[in-house]
Image: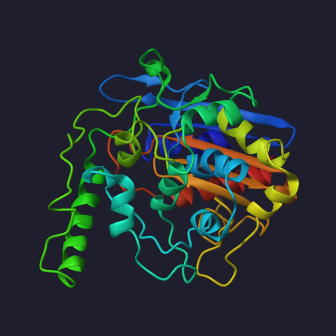
Amino acid sequence: MTLDDFLQREIDVGSFPSAVYAIGSSRGIERENALGHAVAVPMRIPATLDTLYDCASITKPLITTTLALQLLDLNSYVRSLLTHTSGMRAWLPLYLYDNYLDAIRDHGPEYEPGTRVIYSDLNFVLLWSMLPNFVELARERILAPLGIEHDAMFNPPTLQRPRIAATEWGQRYEAKMAAVSDQRSEIRDQRHSDQRSAVSGQGQRLFAQRDGLIWGETHDGNSHFAGGTAGNAGLFATARAIFRLAQSWTNAELLPRALVDEATSNLTPNLEDARGLGWQKPTGSLATSMLTDRAYGHTGFTGTSVWIEPERDRIMVLLTNRVHPCAAPIAMQRIRGEFHRWVLRKC
């Protein structure tokens, strides 16, 4: 079975409507292809190598981390945000509050900093708040120098919609998460006060839940209601552009080699999850058990991933829109693992 056969089979069984991949080394792309439909409902638009995908959380290492390492003082607090050891809870529906930063201050802390790794969007919202003019900085310091500003962007213009992969129909998945978060916050706060928390009382912001097809705007609610990005998501890009961003890390083009090596090392060796500065490290999961300890990468909720294997000089990019038209549970980690095994075996 070829790689294309494998991905087409996953499309046929409904794991995702489309997949685009780019595989290569520090020298460049060696193999790429596009399969399936970038938009499956209410119309059908085939995926191509020029399709822009909502990259979701791979925005974190490729854009936000790069800017943080370029521009911020890497003190212990910033490092705790980048390694997800800050003590913040995993997620909050920040768009329900009057102010994102106040909400994180009041409701984000959940455990003692430095004692656990809890992967948290809140960490990257805080980093975003430290980087004024975030989108312009990303264009000037990352996208333009790499020559990919036409294939990687935030807030893609409406005219670009035909080349964008659609995501969920409505904000249904996050709406369920927000309801659970609301209940937990209320229970927690009632333990300390007779007053209701800001999640469900004073300080709550009225917002319009997205009911139609999310197509051409970021799927992530916190980024969407922040104007297109909150540092945790929001990047739209082709597989080729994501490969170029990963290649810039492999070749230390935007950061000093020593800083790249540090950022891609395991900086949480005695904790339950392996993290670098902004990057995930292999943990023996279905997606990464075939990778060496030097590998680093990241995944995105919409069905995206990028992993770099320095020992074998492999860059592996797989972009899907697995949340289109609904965010149903699928074995995405297994699929990523099979993709990585095929690349490492055949390429």
Q: Residue at x 28, y 45 (%)?
A: 171
Q: Residue at x 63, y 39 (%)?
A: 4
Viewer can see residue 1: no
The mark tally for this picture is: 0
Examine the image and state in which quarter residue 273 appears.
bottom right
Give the percent coordinates (x, y) of residue 272. Answer: 58, 81
Task: Name the residue nearer the viewer: 85 or 250.
Answer: 85
Task: Name the residue nearer the viewer: 132 or 147.
Answer: 132
- The answer to whether residue 238 is above or below residue 289 is above
Examine the image and state in which quarter residue 322 appears.
top left
> For the view shown, which residue lies furthest in the top direction?
159
Examine the image and state in which quarter residue 334 appears.
bottom right
* Colouring scheme, one of rainbow, by chain, secondary structure, one colour: rainbow
Task: Name the residue nearer the viewer: 92 or 67.
Answer: 67
Give the percent coordinates (x, y) of residue 286. Answer: 59, 66
Give the percent coordinates (x, y) of residue 230. Answer: 46, 46
Q: Residue at x 37, y 40 (%)?
A: 224
- The answer to whether residue 53 is above or below residue 174 is above
Viewer can see residue 298: yes
- The answer to whether residue 197 is above or below residue 17 is below
- The answer to whether residue 22 is above or below residue 267 is above
Q: Residue at x 69, y 48 (%)?
A: 71
Give the percent coordinates (x, y) of residue 99. Answer: 32, 52
> For the view shown, which residue lies furthest in the left direction?
194
